[in-house]
Image (cartoon, helix red, strand yellow):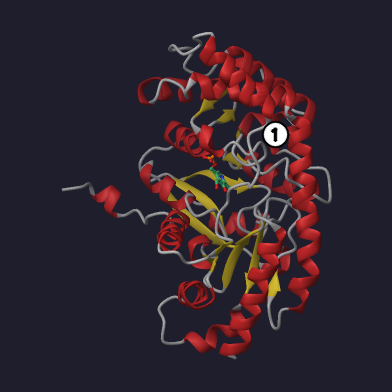
Amino acid sequence: MVSKKIKSITPSFTINISAKVAKLKSEGKEIIDLSIGEPDFMTPNAGKITAKEAIDHNKTKYDMVPGLIPLRDSIVKKLELENHVKYSTSEIVVSSGAKNAITNALTAILDPYDEVVIPAPYWTSYPEMVKLCYGVPIIVQTDKSNDFKLTVKQLSEAITDRTKIVLINNPSNPTGAVYSKEELEPLIEFCINHNLIILADEIYERICYDHPFVSIPSISERAKEITILVNGFSKSAAMTGWRLGYTASNIEISKAISTLQGHLISHPSTIAQWAGYGALKEGSEDMKHMVSIYKNRRDTILPILNQLENVGYVNPQGAFYLFLDLSAYKKFYNNHDSFSIAFCNQLLDEHQVAVVPGIAFGNDDYIRISYATKIELVIEGLHRIQELLSFIK
Ligand code: PLP
């Protein structure tokens, strides 16, 4: 009954794990949940106040398709002040979450069978989103020795005359790796020379610990011209449930995205948009506080990771994930189709710790742990992982 297209889509691993955890919890089991990519903080107060005011003042009608002007104006200011890139208000389209922003961008650009280069490990939804937009995901395996960051050589080997978009997620979910300006420049140069559009998912941009973050479109005017920037409020403002994200792109693309959005959703909830406006205007101290806590957690966790036997990891410089290399233990799971799924199931069933199998991100040797939760829980979770590793070897 359903389309071939929808049949070709894999359901979201992370959402499936959350459902399994919720079921176990409802049966009275105590689970340490390190699977979720959701901040354990609340919406900044300033955002709650402007949302309540919007309701009280009946700002609850249809509004402009690309988003409320005051919100888009403050996004423009944010991008200029924090990311050093100048957009006009009409180049911003506000959407229902970064997910919606990405699918808007893909739909606006792709014709059937156009190819999108996705460096692996990748955020689990990218390949499925590309397929849903009639495109073809081209997965490029990157090297652990380079913290899984894409290089020009890998990109040049992956493109064909059907390639239209290169997707770069910086900081990365699942690895936490962050590209430097020197790493981005040759990639941008290559994309300019080969007429490729960069879809830059910078949703974790504020959660960056060791060096100032470099936004792709800030690198040069030409970089800005070929980039569709995606950002949102879910991660850095801890506003997951409000469903608010945006694209910033050249006017031709922003008009196309706006036309599309006009038919699909009109615009995100006006109340959510006012919440985003408040959070952007006055919530920056709250956001800085969250980032400092994530950084403390990361710094506490790294020495513990170093004690795990035969476990490697990517040095996390941003976002709130750890991507652990368990390939040394793969040989003990030879009779399973997927090592990472079998390991994660065993960890959940026998040690009550939920993490995400690396196969969800295109690398079956790994598992992903989120530290967007209390540090005591992360530490206990890591101890239980060590227990399981000692048992299976
Ligand atoms: N992009 C990346 C890399 C993510 O990790 C996520 C959420 O997990 C999203 C986009 C989607 O964010 P939103 O909640 O704004 O749709």
Residue furthest out toward the front? 28
Query: Residue 291's x, y, as percent?
Result: 76, 45
Query: Residue 48's x, y, as percent?
Result: 62, 25
Q: Amino acid at mark 1?
A: Pro
Indicate whether 201 appears above or below 256. below
Q: Residue at x 72, y 22 (%)?
A: 281
Residue furthest out toward the right? 211
Indicate whether 41 appears above or below 71. below
Q: Quadrant of residue 188?
A: top right
Query: Residue 180's x, y, as percent?
Result: 78, 49
* Ligand 1 location (quadrant): top right
Q: Quadrant of residue 142?
A: bottom right
Q: How many numbered circles are shown?
A: 1
**Residue that numbered label 1 is attached to:** 217
Q: Nearer the viewer, residue 128 or 146?
A: 128
Decide if residue 391 is on the left or right side of residue 263.
right
